[in-house]
Amino acid sequence: MRLRLRPRALRALWIGALASIMLACFAPSVPAQRQVQRAQRGMVVSRHEAASRVGADILRSGGNAVDAAVAVSMALAVVLPQAGNIGGGGFLLFHRASDDLFTFIDYRETAPAAAHRDLYVDAAGNVDTMAARRGHRSVGVPGTVAGLHLAWTRYGSLPWETLLEPAIRLAERNFRPNDELKRALAAERDKLERYPEGASLMLSRGKARRRFKQPELAQTLRTLASEGPDAFYRGTIAAAIEREMRRGGGLITRDDLASYRAIERTPLRGRYRDLEIVCAPPPSSGGVTLLQILGLLEGFELQAIERPGQTQHVALEATARAFADRNTFLGDPDFVQMPLRGLLSPRYLDTRRRTISLDRSTPSHFLAAGDAWAFDSEPPASRARPRADSTRVPQLQRESPETTHVSIVDVEGNAVALTTTLNSGFGSGVMVQGAGFFLNNEMDDFDAQPGQPNQFGLVGGEINAIEPGKRMLSSMAPTIVLRDGEPWLVLGARGGPRIITAILQIILNVYERRMNLQEAVAAGRLHHQWLPDVVWHEEGALTGEVRAYLERTGHRLRNLPRTKSSAQCIAIEPDGTLFGVADPRTQGAAVGY
Ligand code: DON
């Protein structure tokens, strides 16, 4: 039977349809209540609602936390192309409840074989910072596919193809960018338009397309589903990457891809009062620096401090010291020797803590790394010397930070904290022709030249210099916090070095300030990274009294836009209830069941 509508009814239908289209366009794509959820069995928190749903569906259909992590990562490569990826790298921290195993999958990118220490230094001795941040020469050998596959091989349970299926469907679908992707496309338009492959897919006359499909990415994902990582590192996808590199004068070859290995490592573990913190080991600085700051703070009675601003001052001083150590002592453990025991030893931290004045900030140019080797049980023949010459205060570069964190807990109590990145938004800006995915610009996380700041303003040294096959130092810090021996918080963040201070503040907010997780994540954040010698503060992070105290003690304050870091976290409450919180700073979602 054909339905015949009268003109008035037709008009009403039109108006209704138009109104719902407009509402859909203007309503935020993730209402606030989706950013927080309580559930009993499983929980997935990621930076995109569609990806969180994919993960929750995998959990519901009997998959475990690692299965969900693989499916969510692949889905993020489609719906969050500015950060989610198969052309980047990351770290996955896993806790298996049945035997209390904690393990860490390192799938950080590596420098290609043709890379060398002075890759970005020109004949006059100057660093070409743009070459390290844009285009084919900024790309590290991608690790994501190898890392996710390694995690799945060791700890997954559902078939690999099943985990890629939702991402394939998303890539085939006509997809409407959310506000965040539109903003990222606008911010990175210049970069994208230099390499037309990605720009022509996502932009139209310089603006984000209202809708687009990703058929080439769908095909790449289908190939990965049927052939596994071999396709990426040896087969047709490797060939496409090599062709792309040749086209743009990049360094990565088939041999680089074939020799890439994800590595399973032992996570770092440390304590803060009665909490246990399980976190990222090198080549991330995330865990060491977080544990150092907490170790320094443990010597202060934070709850007894009454002067408004003094707690923040002490935390900033601890943070500056830990970052001085970070930038001096940390790098790829397969290439350099690091005084990890020294850096985390209570005696070393005592000596560092004694240099903190309660009412005076130490200017960064008076603050060098400590002599952590003296507290390490095995000092090597040649040690990284603390740098005391850090008098330069570089300016922070403008950058569009794009990393993404996923927290997952399944019905068995297994947990995954996974942080993955292309580094800047859309990485290098280069999309592999015919394969539909962006390549990272992770080479900028190396120190192109000692003393030269990278895009995050981080200033490091020799220890993180470029070498073929080496992993660049990261700040990503997937973390699990235990209370009474049981996982309590599963968390991580984006934001380069601000990842570490975001996680620190969330833990302190929950533990010391007794906030619930939602308040702890939303609270304004402060950031210090030794160099440049400034304290960044988000809106709402400082009351008038706190600001006045920090200024009186000598800190130089600067505004930090709230979008620069964002966290995705889960709290496991004492009765087992899962409380998922996606940071209100971005458009993430918590989906539980
Ligand atoms: O590994 C790192 O530390 C950086 N490549 C992370 C970049 C990042 O977090 C960008 N931000 N959202």
Image: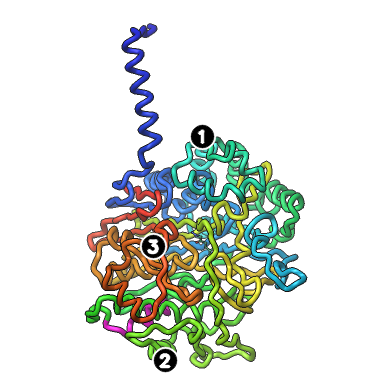
Q: Position of residue 89 (x, y in %)?
A: 56, 59
Left or right: 483 with respect to 318? left
Cα distance in 3D space between marks 1 and 2: 57 Å
Residue 62 in sight in this render: no
Residue 94 in sight in this render: yes
Out of 142 and 450, give the one closest to the viewer.
450
Q: Position of residue 249 (x, y in %)?
A: 75, 55
Q: Which residue is mark 1?
A: 211
Left or right: 487 with respect to 117? left
**Residue at the image point whose x is 33% and y is 7% from the top:** 6
As for residue 517 lying within the magenta part, the answer is: no
Left or right: 250 with respect to 586? right
**Residue at the image point whose x is 35% and y is 13% from the top:** 10
Q: Are marks 3 and 1 in contact (CB under 8 Å)?
A: no
Q: Are marks 1 and 2 in contact (CB under 8 Å)?
A: no
Q: Secondary structure at mark 3?
A: strand
